[in-house]
C-alpha cells in the first residue's frame, strides 16, 4: 500500500512537472479578441528556439488561479477588445499573479493593457499626421484593468502619420541601453510616470526621426521600454515588437544574434526574475 501511494505521488509530481510552462501567450484566436495573431505565431517558435516552454491561452485560463505558467505575454493588437473579454476578474487575477512572484510581458497593446490610464489618438487633425493637436487624444481611465503600472500610456507617437488611430509598421530610431538602434514600431505608447514603479529601469527611449518639426517632439526622449517590480513579480513593457524586423520592405521574424533577438532574451529572462 505504501509503495502504491509512493508511486502515485511520483506520477503526480511527474505530471505536475510536465504541465509546468514558462510562458503563456494570450490569444483566444478569433476575430474579436484584439490580438495581433501574427505576433503570436512569431513569438511561439522564437520562445521555443530560446529553450523556453510556451503555450497559447484564452479567456478562461485567466479567470481562475493558480495559473500553470510563470509569465504571461500580452501581444500587440488592440486593447479595448481585451478589456471587455478578460473582464475585471481576469485582470485582478493577473495582478495577483504578478504580485505573488510571476512575470508579465506586454508588447504594444499589451503595454497599454498593463497601464491604468491611456491617452490614445483617434485621429490626426493636421495633414499627414505630422502634428497632433491635444484634442485628437482620447483619455481612457481603466480602474478595473490589471493596473500593473499606475501612470499613462500615450500613443501613437506624435510625429507619425496614422489612419484611424494606427500607424503603418516601420523601423523607428530608439536609444536602446544607451545606444542608437531601430526597432519595429506599430502604434505603441511611451510611458508617463505619474507614480514611479518600484525598481524602475528604463531600457529604451524614443528618438524623433531627423526632420521632425519642433512642434511634434512630444515623445522624443520618452521611455518606450521599461522594466519594474510589482510585489514579488517582474513586469516588462515594450512599445515595440522586437520579434519582428523589416528587410527589403518586408516584415521578417528576428533571427539569432540580432539586436532584436538579444533584446527578447533580456525581456523574457527578466520577466522570469532572472
Image: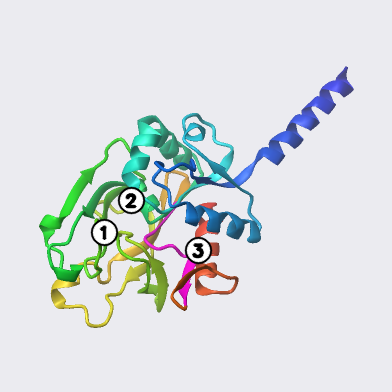
Residue extent of the magenta highlight = 235-247
Residue at image x 14%, y 56%? 136
Is there any visible trace of residue 146 in the rendered image?
Answer: no
Q: Disc 3 or 1, which lies upstream in sequence?
A: 1
Closer-to-camera residue (17/106):
106
Q: Is residue 155 above or below residue 78?
A: below
The answer to whether mark 3 and mark 2 are in CB contact below 8 A is: no
Q: Secondary structure at mark 2?
A: helix
- Left or right of residue 202, residue 263 in this image: right
Q: Secondary structure at mark 3?
A: loop
Q: Disc 3 or 2, which lies upstream in sequence?
A: 2
Pinpoint residue 219: horizontal percent, then vertical percent: 24, 67
Q: Is residue 217 above or below residue 225?
A: below
Closer-to-camera residue (190/2):
190
Marks 3 and 1, how far apart in space?
Answer: 20 Å
Is there any visible trace of residue 245 in the rendered image?
Answer: yes
Residue at image x 19%, y 72%? 217
Marks 1 and 2, how far apart in space?
Answer: 9 Å
Seen as rendered, the residue at the extreme top is 1
Pinpoint residue 238: horizontal percent, then vertical percent: 40, 59
Q: Residues within 10 Å of mark 2 (few under 14, many from 20)?
A: many
> Is 246 colored magenta in this rendering?
yes
Quarter of the picture containing the N terminus is top right
Task: Tell me where residue 145 sits by quadrant.
Answer: top left
Which residue is label 1 attached to? 155
Which residue is label 3 attached to? 243
Which residue is label 2 attached to? 112
Pinpoint residue 129: horizontal percent, then vertical percent: 19, 67
Amino acid at each position: 500500500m505504501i509503495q502504491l501511494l509512493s508511486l502515485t505521488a511520483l506520477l503526480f509530481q511527474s505530471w505536475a512537472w510536465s504541465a509546468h510552462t514558462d510562458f503563456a501567450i494570450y490569444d483566444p484566436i478569433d476575430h474579436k479578441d484584439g490580438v495581433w495573431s501574427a505576433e503570436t505565431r512569431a513569438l511561439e517558435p522564437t520562445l521555443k528556439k530560446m529553450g523556453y516552454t510556451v503555450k497559447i491561452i484564452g479567456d478562461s485560463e485567466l479567470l481562475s488561479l493558480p495559473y500553470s505558467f510563470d509569465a504571461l505575454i500580452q501581444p500587440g493588437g488592440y486593447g479595448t477588445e481585451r478589456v471587455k473579454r478578460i473582464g475585471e476578474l481576469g485582470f485582478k487575477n493577473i495582478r495577483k499573479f504578478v504580485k505573488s512572484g510571476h512575470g508579465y510581458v506586454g508588447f504594444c497593446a499589451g503595454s497599454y493593457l498593463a497601464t491604468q490610464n491611456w491617452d490614445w489618438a483617434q485621429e490626426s487633425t493636421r495633414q499627414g499626421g505630422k502634428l497632433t493637436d491635444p484634442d485628437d487624444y482620447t483619455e481612457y481611465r481603466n480602474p478595473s484593468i490589471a493596473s500593473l503600472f499606475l501612470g499613462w500610456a500615450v500613443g501613437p507617437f506624435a510625429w507619425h502619420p496614422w489612419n484611424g488611430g494606427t500607424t503603418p509598421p516601420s523601423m523607428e530610431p530608439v536609444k536602446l541601453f544607451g545606444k542608437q538602434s531601430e526597432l519595429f514600431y506599430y502604434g505603441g505608447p511611451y510611458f508617463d510616470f505619474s507614480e514611479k514603479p518600484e525598481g524602475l529601469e528604463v531600457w529604451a527611449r524614443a528618438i524623433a526621426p531627423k526632420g521632425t518639426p519642433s512642434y511634434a517632439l512630444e515623445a522624443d526622449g520618452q521611455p518606450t521600454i521599461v522594466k519594474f517590480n510589482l510585489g514579488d513579480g517582474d513586469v516588462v513593457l515594450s512599445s515595440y515588437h522586437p520579434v519582428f524586423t523589416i528587410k527589403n520592405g518586408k516584415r521578417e521574424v528576428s533571427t539569432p544574434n540580432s539586436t532584436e533577438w538579444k533584446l527578447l532574451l533580456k525581456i523574457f529572462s527578466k520577466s522570469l526574475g532572472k
